[in-house]
Structures are given as C-alpha cells and as structure tokens.
Image (spheres, helix red, strand yellow):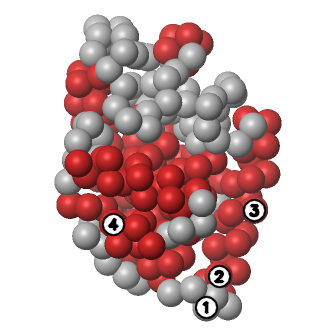
Amino acid sequence: MKQTDLPKGATPLDAEELEGLRLKHITTRGELNRWEQENISEAMDWLDKRKNKSEILTEEFVKKLHEKMFYKVWSWAGSFRRSVTNIGVDWPRIGAELHQLLDDVEYWIEHKTYTADEIGVFFHHRLVKKHLFPNGNDRHSRLMTDILLTDVLGQIPFSWGNGDLIEEGDVRNRYIDALVLADKHDFTKLMQFVRS
C-alpha cells in the first residue's frame, strides 16, 4: 500500500508495520479507511454487548479495544508500537506512560479535579499524543474518550466537530490544529471542538 496520500497529522508506517496488513489487496488510503471503518463498526457492536462497562481504565481494555477495532485489517492490532515515530513517546516507555495517564484519570475522577468534559479532553489529548499503536491512534483515542464519558462519567459522548476526521478537510484540520495548541497547553480550541 502506498503512503503518499496521508492526510494532515497522519504518521507513516514503517516497512515492518506495513507487512502486518492482512488484506493484501488494499492499495489506497481510501480502501484502507473503508476496511478499517467496517472493522470499527464491529467493535462498536462488541462494546454494546460487553457486560462489564466500568473496567475501562486498564491497559488490558485499551489494548482490547484497539484489537477489536482493527484486528481484521492489521496483524498487530492491540499491540503497542515498537517503532520510532516523529510523534509519541519512546516506544519502550509506552506501557509506563499509559499507566501514569490511567492513574491520573482515576485521581481526577475521584477528587473531582476537573469537569467531565475537561477530563475527557485532557485524557484524549494525552492518549493520542502518546501514539500507543502503529495506526489508528486518533480513532482509538476518540472512542476511548467517548467510552470514558459515557460508561464512567455518565455524560454524552463528544461530537468531535460533527464531521469527517479521517479524510483531509476543514474538520480534520481544525481537530489537528486544536491538538497542536493543546500540545502548547492551550486547550481552548480543543474544548470547543469536541462539543461542536
């Protein structure tokens, strides 16, 4: 599959990660997106049917959700990244960094440190910034955040700009720009975007 048609903010896969593509007939980003979206739809069904809806702030659940979202497309679905990228934490630190984030979120909830929307935004930003997996981090982080909002915080999920965040366009550009500002500790645009 060619990686020349990456949208703004997307991280290219290395050769070993590309080898993990289960569907060898995929040659374009559009085809990949369609197959991944079909797999994500199945993951949504799995989420609706699961019995324990409170145990989400665990490494096991984070990995399981990614696996359910992408296992039909990628052989490494649900496994942490083991490559150097232009974003994200150093791959050997992914597990420790994730545990710190999950502990922080539990603390924020227990001590009512932030509002539910602030917890969701801070969680999403830190999760996506870590770049846990070779691919699908934005989608995984958004879905994890929505599960946190609905299943733990009793809130409605974010609207995420009410548009297409996969393809290049205005909504994706606003999302990426808001994440870049959040990297500089300015969460204003991201707070606005998630409920727009």
Quadrant hosting residue 189: bottom left
Q: Which residue is mark 1?
A: 112
| Residue at image location 32% in from the left, 47% down from the top | 173
Residue most toward the bottom? 112
Regarding mark 3 in the picture, which secondary structure is present there?
Answer: helix
| Labels 4 and 1: the sequence-earlier one | 1
| Percent position of residue 81, x then y | 64, 32
Q: Which residue is mark 2?
A: 108
Mark 4–mark 1 distance (CA, rounded to whole Å): 23 Å
Callout 3 amino acid = Gln
Callout 2 amino acid = Trp
Q: Residues within 10 Å of mark 3 (few under 14, many from 20)?
A: few
| Labels 4 and 3: the sequence-earlier one | 3
Residue most toward the left? 163
In this view, 33 is above or below 174: above
Give the side of residue 80 with respect to residue 34, left or right.
right
| Residue at image location 65% in from the left, 82% down from the top | 108
Q: Residues within 10 Å of mark 4 (few under 14, many from 20)?
A: many
| Residue at image location 37% in from the left, 11% down from the top | 2
Q: Are marks 1 and 2 in contact (CB under 8 Å)?
A: yes
| Labels 1 and 3: the sequence-earlier one | 3
Q: Which residue is mark 3?
A: 100
Give the side of residue 14 with respect to residue 29, left or right.
right
Q: Which residue is mark 4?
A: 193
Mark 4–mark 3 distance (CA, rounded to whole Å): 26 Å
Mark 3–mark 2 distance (CA, rounded to whole Å): 12 Å
